[in-house]
């Protein structure tokens, strides 16, 4: 297992009240935040199926996922088994379990808006290791 620690401020400085630029075909782009409270970004996986995911991540805080466009499916380990959770437009999902995601229509063909804390740790392990 590997662990990554995120410390605040963990987001770029932006000009308020102006549109923010998003980078195409990027796995994860933090776009804004409020120091010591939250940060938000856009997630667009390159993986195209669950078998393409070498590891799942689990934060020490919840994450809110909201599908922006395309199709994205989360692979979630619910404590007993892995399950696929296709995200639906307009239906946010609060994720607390080990997870990762894929775009079934091709790399970076779906995008998800994600909100999380500005200070947390993330644990990474293979899907099989989360089942042990």
Image (spheres, rainbow, N blue to C red):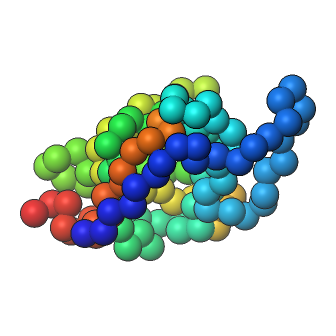
Judging depth in this view, the residue of 130 and 51 nearest the camera is 130
Whether 7 is drawn above or below 115: the answer is: below
Instruction: Tell me where residue 14 appears, x and y as whole percent.
Output: 80, 40
Judging depth in this view, the residue of 127 and 40 nearest the camera is 40
For residue 34, which quarter of the picture?
top right
Q: Residue at x 78, y 58 (%)?
A: 23
Whether 119 is drawn above or below 22: the answer is: above
Q: Residue at x 38, y 73 (%)?
A: 54
Numbered-mark total? 0
Res 118 seen here: yes
Instruction: Tell me where residue 16 appears, x and y as whole percent.
Output: 83, 30
Instruction: Tell me where residue 79 appears, x and y as whole percent.
Output: 16, 47
In the rendered structure, the answer to whether residue 60 lies left or right of residue 40 reads left
For residue 67, which quarter of the picture?
top right
In the rendered structure, the answer to whether residue 88 lies left or right of residue 25 reads left
Instruction: Tell me where residue 71 appears, x and y as whole percent.
Output: 61, 49
Q: Residue at x 19, y 53 (%)?
A: 81
Q: Residue at x 85, y 36 (%)?
A: 15
Which quadrant of the rendered structure holds the N terminus? bottom left
Whether 89 is drawn above or below 100: the answer is: above
Res 111 seen here: no
Which quadrant of the rendered structure holds the C terminus? bottom left
Specify the farthest residue to the right: 18
């Amino acid at each position: 297992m590997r662990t990554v620690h995120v410390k605040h401020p963990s987001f770029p400085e932006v000009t308020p009240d102006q549109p923010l630029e998003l980078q195409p075909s990027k796995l994860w782009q933090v776009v804004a935040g409020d120091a010591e409270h939250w940060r938000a970004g856009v997630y667009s996986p390159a993986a195209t199926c669950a078998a393409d995911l070498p590891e799942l991540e689990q934060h020490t805080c919840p994450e809110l996922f909201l599908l922006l466009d395309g199709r994205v499916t989360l692979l979630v380990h619910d404590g007993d088994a892995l399950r696929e959770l296709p995200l639906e437009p307009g239906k946010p999902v609060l994720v607390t379990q080990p997870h990762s995601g894929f775009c079934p229509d091709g790399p970076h063909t779906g995008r998800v808006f994600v909100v999380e804390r500005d200070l947390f740790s993330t644990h990474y392990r293979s899907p099989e290791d989360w089942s042990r």
